[in-house]
Image (tube, rainbow, N blue to C red):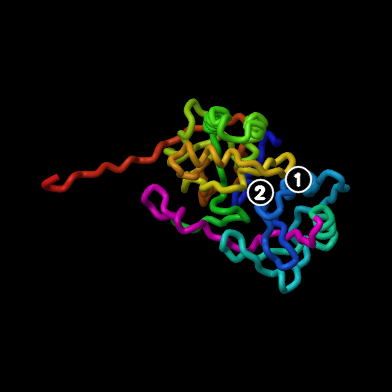
């Protein structure tokens, strides 16, 4: 875990800039290949390298410089991420063989082209009743630049899982520690508040002087049922989330950061920073005549 990290144009610097695709150029996720969670990239900003490790494999080192990658073959020049067509660069045969050997299937590592602009989802383009001036660029994320979860919400969910102990797999319920639950939701920002699910009502959050707009809530699926330590599946926490939030399968908030046009420096996020929030304005309904 890092203590601080710079912000890039599409989110945290280098975050979700790479993806693994199969031999047909189709993006692989943990839904199809749970063992992806066992591949761990480590980025060294000072040396400008990324080291990829996995149990039973020798580490493989790659440069962070885009020009080191070769334009991948025509059949792999485009693929889709959450319905969006994206363009990328093939990271080469060496890393392809490494990933293929670990997963046991022919696979390739693709990096998003820096020149390729992927727009924010249309449903998130309206913030506080005002359309965004320009469309922010996304990396290879699902919906938005950042995903935030609240530790208080995690603790509340953990309690609900334990209360359901008689109706669910007790072994999996006991095994779900707070840290494991945090990892299962795969957020890149974790905050801690006094009350659970406060984040559902936020409009803006300022973290260490860096302002983010909340652009929506994250809908959850079976991905959170995958243990990020070993790739094994369980029914929790999706089962409890389904029953405890009025079947609104959301957990966590999508965030957007638009740096000021005059800003010439790279903002930094640091662990332990103070956060300040502004809640959404609640709309009031004025009854019409006769009501």
Left or right: 229 as drawn, with respect to 11: right
Identify the residue at image location x=63%, y=43%: 225
Identify the residue at image location x=68%, y=55%: 32
Image position, residue 235 (x, y; %): 61, 41
The foreground one among 50 and 223 is 223
Q: Farthest residue in the bottom direction?
A: 74
SS for dot 1: helix
Image position, residue 291 (x, y; %): 14, 45
Q: What distance separates the C-alpha of mark 2 from that of mark 1?
A: 17 Å
Per the rendering, the mark at residue 38 is 1
Q: Which residues are magenta?
A: 104-132
Residue 110: in magenta span = yes
Per the rendering, the mark at residue 290 is none
Left or right: 225 as drawn, with respect to 193: right
Categorize mark 2 by other alpha carbons within 10 Å: few (<14), some (14-19), many (20+): some
SS for dot 2: loop
- Residue at which label 2 appears: 15
Location of residue 81 with respect to 187 vertically, above or below: below
Identify the residue at image location x=57%, y=63%: 84
Location of residue 46 with respect to 22 vertically, above or below: above
Location of residue 71 with respect to 196 vertically, above or below: below
Q: Are marks 2 and 1 in contact (CB under 8 Å)?
A: no
Residue 27: in magenta span = no
Q: Quadrant of residue 76?
A: bottom right
The foreground one among 250 and 109 is 250
Categorize mark 1 by other alpha carbons within 10 Å: few (<14), some (14-19), many (20+): some
Front: mark 2 or 1: 1
């Amino acid at each position: 875990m890092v203590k601080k990290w710079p912000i890039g144009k599409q989110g945290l610097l280098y975050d979700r800039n790479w993806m693994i695709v199969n031999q047909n150029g189709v993006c692989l996720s943990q839904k199809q290949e749970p063992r992806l969670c066992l591949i761990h990239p480590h980025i060294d900003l000072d040396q400008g390298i990324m080291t990829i490790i996995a149990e039973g494999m020798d580490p493989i080192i790659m440069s962070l410089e885009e020009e080191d990658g070769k334009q991948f073959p025509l059949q792999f020049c485009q693929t889709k991420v959450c319905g969006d067509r994206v363009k990328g660069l093939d990271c080469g045969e060496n890393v392809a063989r490494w990933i293929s050997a670990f997963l046991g299937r022919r696979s390739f590592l693709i990096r998003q082209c820096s020149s390729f602009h992927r727009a924010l989802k249309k449903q998130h383009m309206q913030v506080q009743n005002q359309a965004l001036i320009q469309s922010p660029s996304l990396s290879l994320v699902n919906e938005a630049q950042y995903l935030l979860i609240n530790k208080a919400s995690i603790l509340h969910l953990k309690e609900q899982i334990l209360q359901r102990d008689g109706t669910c797999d007790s072994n999996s319920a006991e095994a779900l520690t707070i840290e494991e639950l945090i990892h299962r939701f795969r957020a890149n920002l974790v905050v801690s508040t006094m009350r659970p699910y406060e984040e559902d009502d936020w409009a803006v959050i300022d973290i260490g002087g860096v302002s983010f707009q909340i652009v929506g809530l994250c809908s959850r699926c079976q991905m959170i049922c995958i243990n990020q330590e070993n790739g094994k599946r369980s029914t929790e926490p999706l089962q409890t989330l389904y029953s405890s939030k009025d079947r609104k399968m959301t957990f966590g908030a999508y965030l957007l950061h638009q740096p000021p046009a005059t800003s010439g420096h790279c903002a930094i996020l640091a662990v332990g920073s103070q956060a300040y929030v502004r809640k959404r304005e609640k709309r009031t309904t004025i009854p019409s005549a006769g009501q």
